[in-house]
Image (cartoon, rainbow, N blue to C red):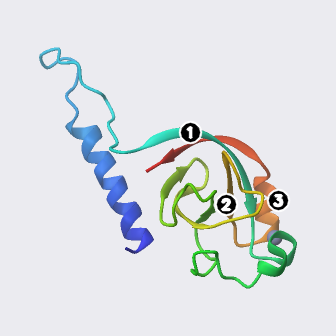
Amino acid sequence: MDLKICAAIIVIMATIFIISSPSSDDGGLQAPVIFVPNAIIKEMNVSAYCPCVKCCGIWSDGITASGKPAEGLIIAAPPIYAFGTIMDVPGYGVATVQDRGGVIKGNKLDLLFPTHQEALNFGRQYLKVKIY
Ligand SMILES: [Zn+2]
């Protein structure tokens, strides 16, 4: 499925759940305010990269480990996260796992940026990532 369509569906679904949640003054039913199905939130050690030789070495051919071009919003994640896994990274956006990295292990993620400077600007951050 196209990533943009995927992201749009998630936003629409999340909005519906927020709108359809009963408010606290209509009968006193205890209901979650926001319910996102199958999503977990995990604190991740997030770094950034770009398709350049400095970031990717011999893998700087512009193609990710999943075979998709290294463009747009792409996450490199450890193999426990299958290609296509959707993640919502604060300050980056909703993106899918399409890449791997030798040092991307445990709770580490690497975010693709179009230029080396943007990757440097992002640096390394500990972020609460929503994983679908
Ligand atoms: Zn780079």
Q: Which amino acid does label 1 sit on?
A: Lys
Q: Position of residue 36 (x, y in %)?
A: 34, 42
Report the image quarter containing ligand 1: bottom right
Rendered image: mark on residue 71 = none
Q: Is mark 2 on a helix, strand or loop?
A: strand
Image point (36%, 69%), residue name: 5
Which residue does the numbered mark 1 point to in the structure image?
42
Which is more foreground, mark 3 or mark 2? 2
Q: Where is residue 69 in the image (x, y as percent from the top left)?
A: 60, 81
Label 2 near ligand 1 (CB < 8 Å):
no
| Mark 2 Cα-neighbour bin, 10 Å: few <14, some 14–19, many ≥20 | many
Q: How far is the residue under mark 3 from the one under mark 1?
A: 23 Å
- Give 81 or 34, whichever is nearer the viewer: 81
Q: Where is residue 55 in the image (x, y as percent from the top left)?
A: 82, 69
Q: Which amino acid does label 3 sit on?
A: Leu
**Is 88 above or below relative to 41?**
below
**Is 75 above or below relative to 52?**
above
Which residue does the numbered mark 2 point to in the structure image?
111
